[in-house]
Amino acid sequence: MTKQILTAIVHKEADLYVAECPEVGTVSQGLTVEEAVANLTEATELYLEEFPQH
């Protein structure tokens, strides 16, 4: 398995933190920065399993 380093951009919207991976286009959210990044990591891993990058 090849490891990739991807970017997580996090910003706050109202009571939630929103995390986005611009290289892949995935977005997730959480009540804390850590939760938002963890959710983004999971969403990005699932996306890349379904749509591998070449």
Image: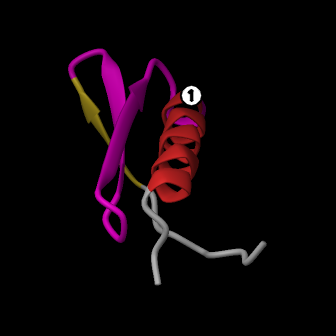
- In this rendered view, identify the residue nearer to me: 17 or 40: 40
Q: Residue furthest left?
A: 14
Please check the rendered image and state whether residue 21 is part of the magenta-colored stretch, yes or no: yes
Horizontally, residue 7 falls left or right of residue 16, namely right
* Residue name at image x 47 percent, y 84 percent: 54
Q: Looking at the image, which residue sits at the far right?
A: 1
**Going by the image, does 32 lie left or right of 20?**
right
Magenta extent: 14-34
- Residue in view at x 52 percent, y 70 percent: 6
Residue 3, by quadrant, is bottom right
Q: Is residue 40 magenta?
A: no
Look at the picture and state if 24 lies above or below 4: above
- Tell me the residue at 33%/21% (across/down): 16
- State the residue position of label 1: 35
Q: Which image quarter holds the N terminus?
A: bottom right
Task: Give the left or right position of residue 1, taking residue 34 as reference.
Answer: right
Crowd band around label 1 with a 10 angstrom C-alpha radius: few (<14), some (14–19), many (20+): some
Which colour scheme appears in the figure? secondary structure
Question: On screen, 6 above or below 40?
Answer: below
| 2 versus 46 height, above or below | below
Q: Is residue 26 above or below residue 17?
A: below
Place of residue 38 in the rendered image (x, y in percent of width and height, measured from the top left) = 60, 37
Q: Which residue occupies the extreme bottom position in the image?
A: 54
Quarter occupied by residue 42: top right
Element marked by disc 1: helix
Number of numbered markers:
1
**Looking at the image, which is closer to me, 1 or 24?**
1
- Picture coordinates of residue 23, whole percent (x, y): 35, 71
Please give the name of the residue rendered at 56% of the width and 54% of the height, measured from the top-left corner: 49
Q: Amino acid at mark 1?
A: Glu
